[in-house]
Amino acid sequence: MNTQLKAKFLYRRDRKHEEGFTLIEMLVVIIIIGILSATAMPSFLNQAAKTRQSEAKNSTGALNRAQQAYYLENQVFADDVNKLSVGVVNSVSYNYVVSGNDFINQVANLATAQQADLKSYAGGVFKSANNLTTVAILCEANSAGNAPINAPTSASACANGSQRMQ
C-alpha cells in the first residue's frame, strides 16, 4: 500500500510541472494581441470622424434639396440657410452657409469643417439649360482640414481640391 501511495504522489508531482503556461508562451500571446490591436486601432479611431462627415453630407444634401424646392416656389434661390427651414444648424463640427452672387441661376451650400480631422463639403444647385428644372451636385474636399471649400463650378464639375460624391 505504501508503494501505491508513493506512486500516486510521484505521478501528481510530475503532472503539476506540465500544467499552465510558460513565460514564453504568455509573451507570444501578448505580442500577437498587441499587433492585432495596433492594426485595428486606427480604423476604430476613424469612425468618429466618419460619423461627423456623414452628418455634413446629409445636411448639405438636404440644403440642396431645399434650395430646389425653394426655387420652384420663388423662381430664385435662397440666400440664407434660415430661409430654407430645414433645421440645419451650425455645430461644433461644421459651419453651414449659403454662398453665391447670382441667386437667380445658381447657389452653393457650403459645410466648412471646424476640426482638422474632418473634410469639408460643398453642394451646388444650378438652373438647367432649359430653365425648367434645377440640377444639384455634392462635392467632398480631397483632404481633411478646416480650410473653406470652393463652390462647385457647374452642375457636373466640382472645384479644384474636391471631388464629386455619388
Image: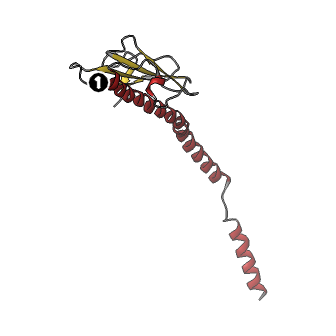
Residue 59 falls left or right of residue 126: right
Residue 71, position as x, y percentages in the image: 34, 23
Q: Is residue 159 visible?
A: yes
Does dot 1 land on a helix, a strand or a loop?
strand
Query: What is the quadrant of the N terminus in the image?
Result: bottom right
Query: What is the quadrant of the C terminus in the image?
Result: top left
The residue sitting at 66% across, 56% down in the picture is 22
Residue at numbered disc 1: 134
Q: Residue furthest top?
A: 101
Residue 95 falls left or right of residue 108: right
Q: Quadrant of residue 16?
A: bottom right
Looking at the image, which is closer to me, 107 or 78? 78
Looking at the image, which is closer to me, 110 or 163? 110
Q: Quadrant of residue 74?
A: top left
Q: What is the image's colouring?
A: secondary structure
Label 1, residues with CA under 10 Å away: few <14, some 14-19, many ≥20: many
Residue 60, position as x, y percentages in the image: 43, 28
Residue 14, position as x, y percentages in the image: 70, 70
From this view, report whether residue 10 is shown above or below residue 2: above
Looking at the image, which is closer to me, 163 or 131? 131
Q: Three-letter amino acid code at disc 1?
A: Thr
